[in-house]
């Protein structure tokens, strides 16, 4: 190899098209492997957040249905017997209670959705785009130049 000729009889710096394509394909495969590995970790984190949100949505719907039925039955008998109220006053009380339960569930869903889910993935994509554009970007408070390829 010291004479500049490889074992295949080609100059040491010259590679065939197949070798270049194979190296490129391996590089792309490693990139996507790392990318989807990070995506998998972020998806597991997101699944925990959205599972809690889903549990509160389902619990809110169940409470709304059962609460509505039992509350309607209770108030209908109570108001009809004790106060002799008309049906529209009873319906007003039902709707107010119903909307309070719905507002609580909507508040819990809103709080659960506010949390950023794919923060590490978006930072990784931002670093990749900045590096490809040759711009500087920040990693954990340290400025890093994208032109140098450092991370």
Image: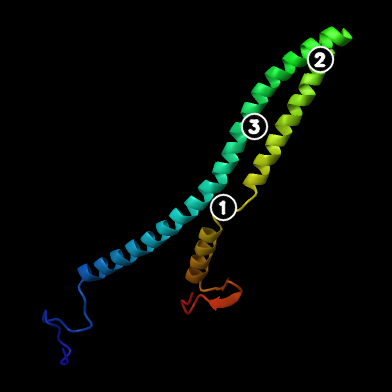
Display coloring: rainbow
Residue 18, position as x, y percentages in the image: 20, 67
Per the image, label 2 sits on a secondary structure element best described as helix
Where residue 17 appears, x then y in whole percent? Answer: 22, 69
Q: Quadrant of the N terminus?
A: bottom left
Question: Going 68% across and 18% down the picture, which residue do you hit?
Answer: 69
On the image, numbered disc 1 is attached to which residue? Answer: 117
Left or right of 118 in this view: 26: left
Instruction: State whether residue 66 is above or below residue 19.
Output: above
N-terminal-most mark, 2 or 3: 3
Q: Which of marks 3 and 1 is in front?
A: 3
Q: Which residue is drawn at 52% across and 67% down?
A: 127
Distance in Å between CA atoms under marks 2 and 1: 44 Å
Image coordinates for residue 39, horizontal then vertical, percent: 45, 55
> Residue at label 2?
90
Number of residues whose C-alpha sits closer than 10 Å to that of mark 2, classed few (under 14), some (14–19) or many (20 or more): some
């Amino acid at each position: 190899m010291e004479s500049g000729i490889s074992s295949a009889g080609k100059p040491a710096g010259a590679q065939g098209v197949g070798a270049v394509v194979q190296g490129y394909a391996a590089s792309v495969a490693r990139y996507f492997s790392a990318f989807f590995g990070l995506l998998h970790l972020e998806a597991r984190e997101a699944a925990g957040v959205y599972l809690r949100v889903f549990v509160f949505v389902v619990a809110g719907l169940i409470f709304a249905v059962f609460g509505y039925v039992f509350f309607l039955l209770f108030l209908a008998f109570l108001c009809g017997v004790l106060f002799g109220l008309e049906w529209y006053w009873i319906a007003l009380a039902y709707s107010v209670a119903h909307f309070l339960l719905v507002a609580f569930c909507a508040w819990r869903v809103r709080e659960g959705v506010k949390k950023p889910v794919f923060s590490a993935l978006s930072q990784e994509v931002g670093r990749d785009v900045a590096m490809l554009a040759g711009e500087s970007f920040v990693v954990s408070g340290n400025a890093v130049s994208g032109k140098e390829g450092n991370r």
